[in-house]
Structures are given as structure tokens and as C-alpha cells.
Image: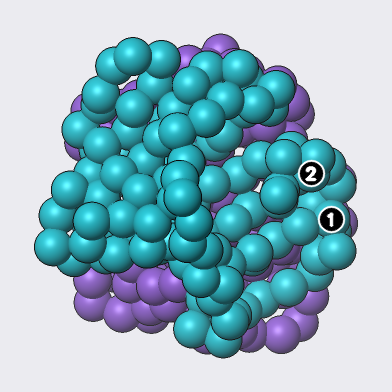
Chain colours: A purple, B cyan
Amino acid sequence: MVVSNIKDVKGMKIEGPVVKAMTKRVLISPKEGWEGYVMRLFDLEEGGYSPRHSHPWPHINYIISGKGILHIDGKDYEVEEGSYAYVPENKIHQFLNRGKETFRFICIVPEEGDQ
Amino acid sequence: MVVSNIKDVKGMKIEGPVVKAMTKRVLISPKEGWEGYVMRLFDLEEGGYSPRHSHPWPHINYIISGKGILHIDGKDYEVEEGSYAYVPENKIHQFLNRGKETFRFICIVPEEGDQ
């Protein structure tokens, strides 16, 4: 089991040719008892984005704060605090921060998808 | 798939001898593609609480806003925005709002636990 707070979880900054201004925190995984799934928290700072890609596993998402775009399969969806999504496997997708504040979202994946 | 916002999901108020001032929203379930799991959102208004009970499935929780107590197996944990928990199966547990604002949290359960 685990009871904790994201303030106590060190974030890993991710920058690269296809990802910008992203920080990742792993919150709940098989190590804490959740067989087969991993709950991660991502922050995108102003101008940040996740990779535009697809993979053979789905995403389960909930937007905690900020304003952005969730791109799925050729379509842009405006998302903000309280938005949620199920992104099916093998669909091209991407998150983009379109506001000034941090865009923070939960992203749950099957264990094999936590890369 | 689904992309939506909790503002567009009707809440179901739950009141009874063991639960107070609770509203439930079902966000993502097998119907939207998530095989085997259901993501729900719960609001507890001032003074509200969920049932103190146990069941043979775990909870995966993330606290969106407010301040409260997560009771697990004889111990009270103070939780607030950014807190998260994995509550194992068969442990007595309960959420209690201990603030003036709404205590809002995500609660993910295996499909058989969405009751």
C-alpha cells in the first residue's frame, strides 16, 4: 500500500527532440500493489508538449490543472482542469500546454507502457 | 474512447446511514474502453464521509482538492490536494472531509467494485 503526496515525489525532467518541458512522477505501480498498471503524473510547463506518437496500449487521463490540447488521431480537443480521456491503443496522440500555468495531468498505462 | 469534462457528467448524490454528503460521477469504465476498471470521481461536501467498510478489491486514489482524512486499518492519514493512495483489498477504510471546501478525489476500482 501507499499513502503519500506528490510534493514528496521527485520529478524526472524529460527533454528531447520530440518532447519539451515535461516532468514525470511515478505515483502508483505494481510495487505499491496495483497489478498490471502504473499511475504517473506529468507536468508540462509553458510551451511544453509530450511526444506525438502511438503505441499498442491505451492511456487513461485526468487533467488536474492548466489548459491545453489533447490531440488524438488528427483531431485537437481542448482540455483543462476536470477533463478526462480514454485514448485507445494505436491512436496517434499528444498533449500540449497552451496556457501560461503548468498543465498537469494523470496518465495511467498498463505496466508495459510505463517507459 | 472518450474526451470529456466532469462539468458535463451528472453527479449522483449518495446519502444514507453510513455515508454523508457524497456525490459520485463515473468517468471511465469498460464502456469507454478500459477493460476491467472504472475511474470514478467523488465529492464530499463539508462534514461528509464515505462508508467505513472493507471489500475484496483495492482502491487507487488521487486527491484533487480539499482537505480530509483517509482512514486505513485503524490509522488516520491526513490527505489533501496532491495526495494519492493505494488501499489494498480487505482493509477497513474511509474518506472524511475535514475542511470547509469540497473534498474531491478520484477512486479507481476493478469493475466488480463499482457499486
- Callout in the foreground (1, 2): 2
Question: On the same chain: label 1 and label 2?
Answer: yes
Q: Secondary structure at mark 1?
A: helix
Q: Position of residue B79 (x, y in %)?
A: 25, 38
Residue A81 found in image quarter: bottom left
> Which residue in the structure is indicated by mark 2?
B111
Given the image, what chain letter belongs to the residue carrying mark 2? B
> Which quadrant holds the N terminus of chain B?
bottom right
Dot 2 alpha-carbon crowd within 10 angstroms: few under 14, some 14 to 19, many 20 or more:
some
Dot 1 alpha-carbon crowd within 10 angstroms: few under 14, some 14 to 19, many 20 or more:
few
Indicate the amino acid at tag 1: Pro
Q: Are marks 1 and 2 in contact (CB under 8 Å)?
A: yes
Q: Nearer the viewer, residue A26 or A84?
A: A84
Question: Is residue A74 in sight in this rendering?
Answer: yes
Q: Secondary structure at mark 2?
A: helix
Q: Nearer the viewer, residue B61 or A111?
A: B61
Q: Is residue B20 above or below residue A82?
A: above
Q: Position of residue A89 (x, y in %)?
A: 84, 54
Gap between marks 1 and 2 measured at Cα: 8 Å
Q: Nearer the viewer, residue A65 or A49?
A: A65
Residue under the image location 52 percent in, 17 percent down: B91
With A99 as the anchor, is B43 left or right in this view?
A: right
Q: Which residue is at the far front?
A: B17
Q: Earlier in the sequence, mark 1 or mark 2?
A: 1
Q: Position of residue A61 (x, y in %)?
A: 58, 58
Question: Is residue A29 in sight in this rendering?
Answer: no
The circle on residue B30 is 1
Indicate the amino acid at tag 2: Glu
With B98 as the anchor, is A13 left or right in this view?
A: right
Given the image, what chain letter belongs to the residue carrying mark 1? B
Count the marks.
2
Residue under the image location 35 percent in, 49 percent down: B49
